Amino acid sequence: MARLIFAFIIVINACNLKKEKTYIANKQPTDVVGPDWTKANKLYDFIYPWRDDVPSRTNFQAVHDGHKFYFRFEVEDNNILTYRDTDHKEEVVHSDRVEIFFKKDDRMSPYFCLEMDAAGRVLDYEAHYYRKMNFNWQWPENGLSVASIQSANGYTVEGSISLASLKALGILDKGRMLTGLFRGECVGLNGKNADLKWISWINPGTPKPDFHVPSAFGVIELTE
């Protein structure tokens, strides 16, 4: 009986591994300055996990050069909504934005979050499961750079993260990162009251919108 149970567990784990979504971040030549997006795979596999309709287009790309991890979101949005008052970083949560979360393991204690709006502002914070967030936390110094561009059709957010900071935080391990890719699509803004539709690479399988759970993450692999 014990052997049967053990075999059953192995089968279940194997099935779970097959379901794990993976994005490959290609390595570009080291003599190239900045990201070479022609080397990057394009990821359009974003969904509304809690809605039946199809979301506006979101495209994610990433490459690395052995020193920095470069990422890019291209977002289709003909009505960009951004809340601005004092430009405090927490104003990002009331705005159109894209998000990258990193976890070390399923305990998610801690995990690290980057929420980036169309104005190029970054809400960086550390959190512990469940939703114990420290907004005073900042990404390691000189380890993160983010910029944005807006157009009539939407916005683009580009950034770079040093591999040294990813390793120091325990995120990057043997070329793999447990990563969540998300978007908050703001469809209405009245003062600080934002009406948001939630878009995700992974369907977390939760009954209501929630990205702060282990099931919301996939894998990004950095090639050699």
Image (spheres, helix red, strand yellow):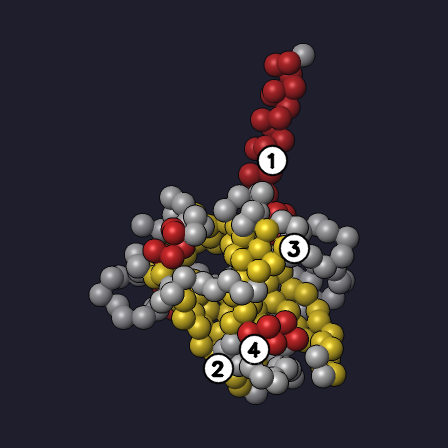
Q: Secondary structure at mark 1?
A: helix
Q: CA distance from mark 1 to mark 4?
A: 44 Å
The crowding category of the residue bearing disc 3, from other C-alpha atoms within 10 Å (few below 14, some 14 to 19, many at least 20), is few
Q: Earlier in the sequence, mark 1 or mark 4?
A: 1
Q: If the image is split into quadrants, where does the N terminus sit? A: top right
Other residues around mark 2 within 10 Å, as few (<14) / some (14–19) / many (≥20): few
The kind of residue on which mark 3 rests is Arg
Q: Secondary structure at mark 3?
A: loop
Residue type of the residue flagged with mark 1: Cys
Query: The disc labelled 2 sits on which kind of residue?
Result: Ile
Is residue 40 in view from this perspective?
Answer: no
Sequence order check, earlier mark of 2 and 3: 3
Compute the Cα span from label 2 to label 1. Answer: 41 Å
Give the number of the mark in front: 1 or 4: 4
Q: Residues within 10 Å of mark 1 (few under 14, many from 20)?
A: few
View extreme (top): residue = 1
Of helix, strand and loop, which one carries label 4?
A: loop
Q: Position of residue 174 (x, y in %)?
A: 38, 44
Residue carrying label 3? 131
Between discs 3 and 4, the one toward the N terminus: 4
Q: Is residue 96 left or right of residue 62?
A: right
From the viewer's perspective, is 168 left or right of 128?
A: left
Q: CA distance from mark 2 to mark 3?
A: 30 Å
Pointer 4 residue: 88
Q: Which residue is mark 2?
A: 149
Q: Residue at x 67, y 69 (%)?
A: 55
